[in-house]
Image (tube, coloured by chain):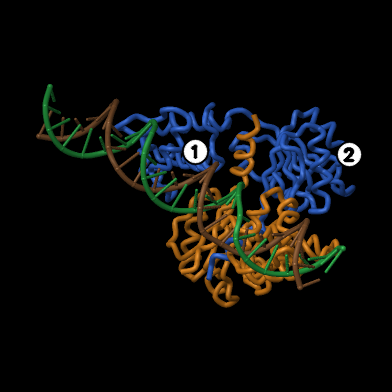
Chain colours: A orange, B blue, C green, D brown
Amino acid sequence: MKKSIPKKTVQRLLLYYRSLNFLLQQGIKNISSKSLAGLMEIRDSQVRKDLSYFGHLGKRGAGYDVLELRDKIARILGIEQVKNVCIIGMGSLGSALAAYKGFAALGFKVRAVFDNASHKVGRKIRGYECRPMEAMEKIIRQEDIEIAVLTVPADAAQEIAVRLEKCGIKAILNFAPVKLSLSRRVKVSNVDLAMEIKTLSFFIK
Amino acid sequence: MKKSIPKKTVQRLLLYYRSLNFLLQQGIKNISSKSLAGLMEIRDSQVRKDLSYFGHLGKRGAGYDVLELRDKIARILGIEQVKNVCIIGMGSLGSALAAYKGFAALGFKVRAVFDNASHKVGRKIRGYECRPMEAMEKIIRQEDIEIAVLTVPADAAQEIAVRLEKCGIKAILNFAPVKLSLSRRVKVSNVDLAMEIKTLSFFIK
DNA sequence: TAAAATATGTGAAAAAATTCACAAGCGATG
DNA sequence: CATCGCTTGTGAATTTTTTCACATATTTTA
């Protein structure tokens, strides 16, 4: 069996992807693991180890071809193939995410946004027509949505997550500060803004 | 020398803190490491190891006193002492963060918000008067701000970060998808929303 | 109050992630 | 075309994090 890819490696792959795009803009055609590592303050061996999970992407003595490596990483990460997402909860955070350009750059397409507040439903928010929560299951299936971004209040999150699991969502990016209990089938990733800043502040003394 | 605390331990401490608050609301006065671990799908030994960094917080044979443990964690994390923060960049994300209640719950106080767009400066956004970027250094010093939340476009982030370092900011929560190069003195934590969702989607196949 | 049931705290073991170190491949140079 | 300098790819070593396992302490039960 092939070795499984550490999550951290995938995250760094994305950082490499960004740096490589930057280098391309600069007109730089070739780079060594050492220089690439220097851009993000990690070791060169880390770069090589990460890339080695995916085959022989460089050339001994010569380093990596920037364009080629970028495209290989894009393929590994599946950036070229579009994934449909929806955003649930059109509060200030949900609507900021609806406006966020970064998703599109990595191959995500917002196909629907939901809220249950009657004054929002039917109105356009950031260019997306806000749909009612009752229609969620139907629309997710219709639009072939695989990933849900969950930006609802903490006390509503678990209930909605269960509904999402039932209608076949594959992954949830959860911004609510609660642990979602779902079956192993659904991948959940938590972004906890308060926690990020608190962790940061712990280490400043 | 005392053992240094792993970052992951600090993060979990915050999760424990949340769970303990929840348990308190439920009127639960006592809990074992096993039950607490069950709430967040980790091992009981992990809970005990994490807590053991900070002394003997529980009672053999009896578990942990919920209220007491919560307060001890609050003290460890410094939740009771208010830290002043500012938000730089009043785009949709910045202004969503300005409205975010979660910061206050962990002892953070937004003392200023900044933007350089002239149509925003001087206006109230989410209850905060938007200040001009020129005044940043002065206000940070005046208001004793230690932490900056950076929600500006990627191409402006590095330059502002350098200014922040110069005026003595201790930590930056960076939402711009770029690596900030600063001296070791300033702690930087990156929140990269596109990266989160891409990492998630990598593991669904 | 003695025995049984619980549950912590912590070294030791295991697992995971990072870093080292070097053989092997490539390109440039003379 | 042989040599030299550079750089990859990768096992081995190291470091970090997690899990195990058990001695020790407390509570409950009979």
User: Which residue corresponds to the image point at 86% horizontal and 46% vertical from the top-left?
Assistant: B116
N-terminal-most mark, 1 or 2: 1
- Would residue B132 appear left or right of A81 to someone viewing this image? right
Do labels 1 and 2 touch, CB within 8 Å? no
- Would residue A86 appear left or right of B35 to someone viewing this image? right
In the picture, the disc for residue B75 is: none
Amino acid on which the number 1 mark rests in the picture: Tyr
- Relative to A3, say whether B190 is above or below: above
How far from the left and from the top, in percent, is residue A86? 61, 66
Circle 1 marks a residue in which chain?
Answer: B
In this view, the residue in front, B180 or B194, is B180
How far from the left and from the top, in percent, is residue A14? 67, 60
Q: Residues within 10 Å of mark 2 (few under 14, many from 20)?
A: few
Residue bearing the label numbered 1: B17
How far from the left and from the top, in percent, is residue A182? 44, 60
- In terms of secondary structure, where does tag 2 sit? helix
Quarter of the image for the N terminus of chain B: give it.
top right
Amino acid on which the number 2 mark rests in the picture: Glu
How far from the left and from the top, in percent, is residue A175? 59, 53
- Relative to A124, say whether B159 is above or below: above
- Relative to B29, say whether A190 is above or below: below
Task: Please indicate, yes or no, whether residue A153 appears anywhere in the rendered image.
Answer: no
- Relative to A171, say whether A202 is above or below: above
Q: Residue furthest bottom?
A: A142
Residue bearing the label numbered 2: B134
